[in-house]
Image (cartoon, rainbow, N blue to C red):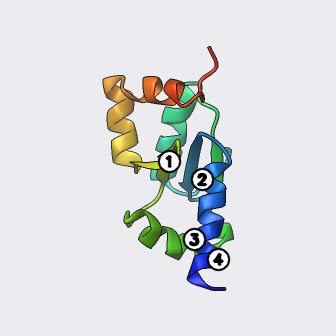
Amino acid sequence: MSQSDVSARIAAHISQAPVVLFMKGTPDFPQCGFSAQAVAALNACHASFHSVNIFEDPELREALKAYSNWPTYPQLYVKGELLGGCDIVLQMYRSGELKPVLAEAGAVAA
């Protein structure tokens, strides 16, 4: 599969929901501590989000690093833009910045 096909798959995932988390495992069964912490922060904000288990698509897992210019997982996208990884998500959660960003994206029920 070509790089453009993989990029199209990544873009399709990102466009599926206002908030998309590329992670190791699933929200119910995260397979790394960083992914688990990112899910916990999103859940604490009562956010709805689309998740992508990068273990199910090794080609996407490698291509996403170049696509996002971000070397690690999880990767959180809000309204099509990379917000960051676990450290940034947790920092924003602790400072109170995360929930308003998620609410503005329409991912938090009123």
Q: Are marks 1 and 2 in contact (CB under 8 Å)?
A: yes
Which amino acid does the dot numbered 3 rest on? Ser
CA distance for labels 3 and 2: 11 Å
Q: Report which residue position mark 3 lands on.
A: 7
Where residue 27 sits: x, y (%)?
64, 45
Q: Note whether residue 98 is visible.
A: yes
Of 7 and 72, the residue lying toward us: 7
Q: Residue furthest bottom?
A: 1
Task: Find residue 92 and report its horizontal and vertical position in percent.
Answer: 35, 33
For marks 4 and 2, give the CA distance: 14 Å
- Tag 4's secondary structure? helix
Judge from the rendering whether residue 103 lies leftward or rightward of residue 83; answer left or right: right
* Discs 3/1, front: 3
Q: Which residue is mark 4?
A: 5
Q: Residues within 10 Å of mark 4 (few under 14, many from 20)?
A: few
Q: In the rendered view of the protein, which quadrant contains the C terminus?
A: top right
Residue 77 disc label: 1
Looking at the rendered structure, the kind of residue marked 2 is: Ile
Q: Residue at x 59, y 78 (%)?
A: 4
Q: Nearer the viewer, residue 72 or 25?
A: 72
> CB atoms at circles 4 and 3 under 8 Å apart?
yes
**Residue holding disc 2:** 14
